[in-house]
Amino acid sequence: MRLVEFRVFTTNFRICMPFWNPSRNTPEEDPVERRPPRLSRKKITKIEGVPVPFWFRNDTFQRFRDLDLRDDDIILSSGVKMGTTWVTKILNSLLHDFDDDGNTTPMYMDDSFPNRLGQTYPDALFPSRDVLRREMADLMAKTPKGREPISSNFGDFVFDDLIHQPTPRLFSSHLFGKKLLPKRLFDGWVEQRDGTIATGPPSRGQRGKGRLIVVVRNLKDTLTSLHFFRGEPKDGWDGNEHGPGSFRRFIDLEDCPNAYGDSFHWIKASAEAVEAVGSDRVLVVYYEALKANVRAQLRRINDFLGLPPLTDAKSRAIADACSASKMRSETGGRFKYAIRKGSVGDWVNYLNDERWKELDQVFDDSLGGIDLAEPLRFFQQKEIPGMPLIPWQDCDLETDRRTWSPYLCVSLREGMVVPDPDIVHTNNAIKRILSSTFRLLSFSSKTPVDLDENGSDGSPRYHLFLAPSDPWASPILAAMKLLGLERKVSVDISDGQSGAGWAFLNGASCAPWKGREGPFWLYEAYQLADPLCTTKILVPVLWDTVTERIVSNDSWEILKLLSTSSGSVTEIDDRSLFPEELKPMIEAMFSDYIGPLIDDVITAGLEYFRNDQNETERLQKGRINAYTKLLHLDSLLGTTRYLLGDTVTIVDLYFSAFLFQFDACYLDAFAFRGSDGFGEPILSGSCYPNLTAYARDMFQLLKPFVHFESFGEVFRIGPSIALTRQSCSSGGKSMDTLRESATATVPNLRDIIVFLEQPARESN
């Protein structure tokens, strides 16, 4: 073990960083003449099974553990090379350094108390100045002539300085988990007669105090940053005669010698601490989210700390002050080694795919299913998996999407792409908040959107993102045609799903992404609309290019918006698709029958796949509910041509599109064929004669907008759900095996089209 020291240009600040470092080749210093003195030890010191750095002091660690926390205290627990210095600077900036006008306060760059120009670790400090003077006197007497002793690990600060720092107090550390963080942070602590703190069941002791901020970073960038800290190690990435190499040390889950242990255990123990503290007193900050939108994250951290609303001026000032370049320049280079590049994705420039896949496997085996770790998956991908192979326009009826690679089913959690918990967890009552959608807030069917408005470049202000495999694309496209809105609303059509959600291989044609090379993913629109949103990544999306906000991602609301816009008169008979006199009946038909019917079918299909294609009571109930509603609608259509009489309305567009897709994919992909209650197709079977005639009638109207060649996307759902669930647990099937699991038979789409093209019935 080598003692790694670097000095900065103040007598009150000296950082000694705790990394396993057998020998470094540092470009900035001569390897012989300017190398710091070595301190060697044969045995690595561990606390609670965790390796600790050379400067670790058990006496101050125990004081930290028994710390008399206040309610407004802030415990910052950050992994090694995960952004500790950066977030410490951000917290000080929010708490002390800037006023609401963005001006610096007298406390700006004041290094007279801890954590001001960098983190001051509690477990590295002398308990008091008396102990500091006494121990340093002993050390001076033992220091060989000509050698300079290390006066302290963090300048002149002692633990008492941390205790008496301005409120709210900030304690920044690499310590983590319930066994290393202050005991009073967690429910169940009890103060004993000798003043020490004991922990017990949360229900028996006192309530926890203080607030916890946990900082994590994708582990591939963490490893890369650690590898290059103060120059490359002599044993390189993979090891040689000098040692095992930084890669092997990093993924060693049994005996990792790095200070504070392996990052995988750090994240797992931190996740347990986060759960124990509770959502009201804990905030998880992701390094990549900070880099992507620092001002949104500043607002998030500010709100968590309970500070006054963050002004735009203060936010801008802090974002500038906390940039890597500004931090380096303002501190005379003291962050030269603490902040190497401050970038995301630098890991792709090192090692080979085989090594990174090995790390991915360790990640899956050790952290699969841990919520805190899931956002890291997205940042640890070199390429988005499961991308569509060809644009949707190039697909035909022979295109078999079952042969395409499955994708990771994802959603957004606080603006970050994560595996969809409704897929990962069998009980979809878990985290139902992820089912939230952007609903109409300022618009309603009584206050239509003005679709005649244009953006700054003269193109339509409003833009639609659709997916042809989604049943709601065809009724929306048909409505636009029938209402004469094709030139008033621009459209992009997705080529299919991917590990980042709906993908558009040729990019987006609207602002602000117009002209950007490469693919576009729909999650980008959600993130831009609300950087901290928690939601499904749904289609369709009606996008406002002027405000850069999502107007709605609800297909039914979008249909109503289009139908009530100015000049929306149909080409059929100069009547609206959503006439005022029929609005109550249309809404009732949708809410009582059509909406629940479609929900029953989709829910049953997802239930089928989430339970490994096994029958469940819930699945059977969903099917029976769907069949019951179909029978009712078939009976209704025996007395009327359309759902509400002789006039086509938006509810007819909506329902008929579902009927086309049911026979083309849901019947087989979701295992409805041959199931209890009914097993025949709707269109070509004998059970629903009136629905069959109705579907043929509506197909004459919707035919140009029904893309049967894209319906095969539905058959990718099963293998993709399996991939998502196995990725969030240890072990699993290979990609080839997952593709082979797509065993559902694809019906002959040509036969369905021929059947629908047969003469429609006469009006009743």
Image (tube, rainbow, N blue to C red):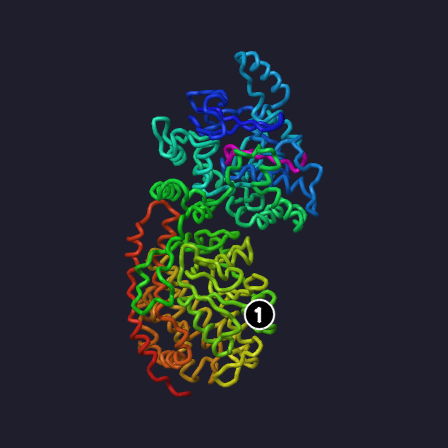
Residue sitting nearer the eye, 369 or 404 = 404
**Residue 142 percent coordinates (x, y):** 54, 12
* Residue 593 in view here: no
Observer-nearest of 697 and 395:
395
Q: Position of residue 452 (x, y in %)?
A: 57, 73
Residue drawn at (42%, 46%), measured in percent from left and top?
380
- Looking at the picture, does residue 558 appear above or below residue 131? below
| Residue 642 rendering spot, x and y as whole percentages | 44, 81
The residue depicted at 45 percent of the width and 34 percent of the height is 228
Quarter of the image that includes the N terminus: top left
Instruction: Decide whether residue 181 is among the magenta residues.
Output: yes
Indicate whether 603 appears above or below 218: below
Q: Residues within 10 Å of mark 1 (few under 14, many from 20)?
A: some
Residue located at (36% from left, 34% from top): 238
Q: Nearer the viewer, residue 218 or 301?
A: 218
Q: How many marks?
A: 1
Check disc 1 and report the residue beneath it: 454
Up-down relation of residue 476 to residue 22 (above or below):
below
- Read off the magenta span: 166-182
Frontmost residue, 29 versus 627: 29
Residue 653 appears in which quarter of the rendering? bottom left
Q: Quadrant of residue 236?
A: top left
Q: Position of residue 299 (x, y in %)?
A: 61, 49
Secondary structure under the numbered disc 1 in the rendered image: loop
566 displayed left or right of 248: right
Residue 113 lies within the magenta run: no
Type of amino acid at the residue the image marks with label 1: Asn
* Residue 337 in view of the camera: yes
From the viewer's perspective, tell me whether residue 399 is left or right of residue 48: left
Question: Does residue 368 appear to the left or right of 135 in the view shown?
Answer: left
Q: Quadrant of the C terminus?
A: bottom left
